[in-house]
Amino acid sequence: MVKKETSTQKGGRPKKEQQTKAPLPATTRKKKPVDKSPEPEYIVGIGGSAGGLEALETFFRAMPVDEGLAFVLIVHLDPAHKSITDELIQRCTTLKVSEARDNMAIEPNAVYIIPPGKNLSILNGRIQLMNVTAKHGVKMPIDYFFRSLAKDQKEKSIGIILSGMGTDGTLGLRAIQEVGGMTMVQDPISAKFDSMPRSAIKNGLVDFSLSPEKMPEVLVSYIRKSPAIISKKALERTELTKLQKIFVLVRDRTGNDFSEYKNSSILRRVERRMSLKSIDDMADYVDLLQDNPEEVDLLFKELIIGVTNFFRDPDAFVHLKAGIIKKLKEYPPHQSIFRAWCPGCATGEEAFSIAILVRECLEECNLSNHVRVQIYATDIGNDGIEYARKGRYPKNIAADVSAARLKRWFVDEGDSYVVCKEIRESVIFAVQNIISDPPFTRLDLICCRNLLIYFTTGLQKKIFPLFYYALLPHGILFVGTSESLNCDDELFLTLNVKWKIFERSEAATKLPGAMPAFGFAPVSHTYLARVPYQEVEEKVPDLIGAMLLEHYTPASVLVTKDGDIVYFSGKTGKYLEPAVGRPNINIFSMMQGDFSFEFGTAFHQALQEWEKVTVRGLHTDTLGQDQYFDLTVHPITGYKALEGLILIVFSDLPPKPKRRQARKTPEGTQGVSSELEEELRKLRLHLAGVLEDKQTKEEELKTMNEELQSSNEELQSTNEELSTSKEEMQSLNEELRTVNAELESKNNELGKVNADIRNLLNSTDIATLFLDKDLRITQYTPRILPLFNLIDSDIDRPLSDIVTTLAYDHVIEDARQVFDTLIIQEKNVVTRDGVRYFMRIVPYKTQDNKIEGVVITFTNITTARGIDPPQKKAEPKK
């Protein structure tokens, strides 16, 4: 079938339909080789509706031939009638014009027209015809094709919107701009029906707004300044230095620094602006930016274009919903708010999608009345934030939002869908730079999709610890399918690999330390708990064995700075023995008394100087045998696993020879010797007392030191809590500023609307009275005063309390009946002075279609009937 269509296309003549449809003989088709069709330089999608045919004819009359372009025309056609658009267009151009057929290869210098009753998409440069389904409907074929064109041709896609009613094509132009394509619309002044062009212009999706006869000239100029060609030149000339200059100009103008964005994505956007301005050299474009601040603003808007729509990747939202429901089922009873953050929200579609999804999850978990939803949606572009705050989107979103959700969460207002009040109030929009501004904290969910792909690897490594910090325990992180966690694996657990859904891990042994500076002290890179010495024990045997083989062979003990024994090596029983009482493995309590004084002095000296100290010629009595040895206290350095520990080494000495027996001395000499020995004994006893007292003092000081350490830890904990509170207050302040900005914007809008309504009501000659559901007065116009004697303080009073000049006594009963039945009532009534009025009572509907009261209007019909109103008698004022 593919060969048949290809050969027919090549051999057919568009002048006669019979020749186009007539198949070649089978023998001819077999012998004819199938060559690969040449690919067009660009594919131009042109969409139009009412009044679009005339614009198409004007366009193709001015369009040059042999520019290597292919044109696909998407026009609103009646599916019940055969189209002759191809014949009409063929009269205006020498380009080959034909109706699109399924799986047809798109060739350059040709025009393809969508057949009636079909949706047209493109895959690998070949046309794919789709049956119109209830979801897409026949009303939005332009959006359908433009989106497909953007996905297939990327920056080689061009979208043009001509005259037409509605908003078809708006979302499609956004998709083309997102991939770096070019967009045009017909100048609304020259369009017979300007709804479609104006919708695209209103959404800021237009590169050129021109009349149809001027479009071909700009189109040809654009393709000859191909961004692909500019990219090649940029790489050849090493334009990175000039790109840095552009970063400086954008930062000075907007306050946003793009230097940590990927150069490839930034360069593509810059080249697109250069192509639109017909500039080849980036140095010339830098000069243009310096001389033209408005171009800097346009470039900034170009740089922040984000891919967004409602419920993008529906399957991903299905898995996200499952994760949120699981989290809600484990929600603490005291927690009454679900907080989420959507950085890089663009025009708000994804933020509202998250708000709708969370509300649906709360309803499934029966938590709607207990848990409030608060979504923070931020972006660096103010225009996108202002657009999102309105919550108003074109009818085209029906392609992405199910009919059930449209009915439940949106209000149908003419050519737009407006987000319902419940969802709108749960989302706060604010201008914020994720790189430099403080983050929102204590979050249950962060949705950051297709933003990180524009960041460099270094910047991504700063952002993911930021997300870890902002999320609550077990909080959910939702990123784009083309993004990955560029951080420590221990920070997040994977919930769904395909759709990139993660959960904040509680198994992380350390806090993220690579926090960007946000005006508060960064979290230090500290471990949550001291590593126990049991972990050291696993490595000690090999390390100590190697060390002893290299330096020593005698018995030794490994201790901490406080003397707590970590490891024994060799036979230490000659020097150490357990103390009486409760088990204690501190070396000071186990050291035998013969040399405890010398050991204490040496240990203290080694600890102070952190150098090896040796005491020689010490003596101890072991089972009646004299043992001489050298004692070495060796603080360990150079071994990372043993840092801070001290090695005690006992080096045995050979026994000393026995002394000869002393000769007898005279009695006088013996007496002096005895006195000296007694004095020496007393000094030893005194010294022992001093040492014991010293040891007692050391124990007291040790206890005091432990208490001080405990107090210090408490103060440190308090300081950390204060620091955390400061950060939370800073984040809360940021939230309050955001809320305040939105409230201020809302107040300005409400003030303008109130002024408009007040001037409208005052400018009419119709007497109007607004009543609530209890028939209390909420508002009135000055023209009502001749009928009801009202003053300002009568607001919120029942209508039955007000004196009226009407001779008709059933106004209140009629109003009650309209409120109960919703049936409009119209009657002629007369005042006591004989003035006739036409009374009309209608229900008062809110934005959510709720009935909150009634509106009563009185139109003076006395003059209309040709009856002069009677002269009013003066009545006493109420």
Image: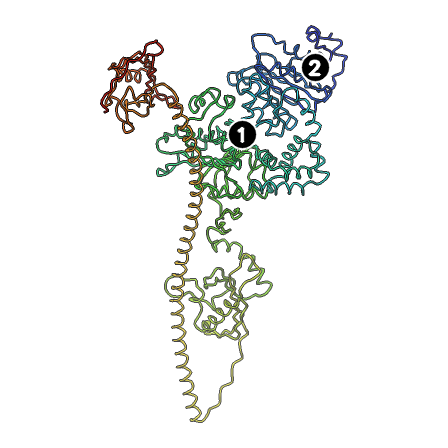
Nearer the observer, 441 or 218? 218
- Which numbered disc, 1 or 2, marks the residue that appears first in the sequence? 2
Q: Quadrant of the C terminus?
A: top left
Q: Is residue 740 above or below residue 174?
A: below
Q: CA distance from mark 1 to mark 2?
A: 38 Å
Please tell me whether residue 729 is drawn above or below residue 145 in the rendered image.
below
Q: Nearer the viewer, residue 855 or 734?
A: 855
Q: Residues within 10 Å of mark 2 (few under 14, many from 20)?
A: some
Residue 847 shown left or right of residue 647 in the figure: left
The residue that disc 2 covers is 93
Residue at position x 50%, y 43% from top? 437
Q: Nearer the viewer, residue 130 or 758?
A: 758
Q: Secondary structure at mark 2?
A: loop
Q: Tell whether 704 sits left or right of 128.
A: left
Label 1 amino acid? Answer: Thr
**Rendered-image quadrant of the N terminus:** top right
Mark 1 highlights which residue?
A: 308
Against 685, residue 772 (above or below) is above
Where residue 203 appears, x then y in whole percent? 54, 27
**Picture quadrant where residue 791 is located:** top left
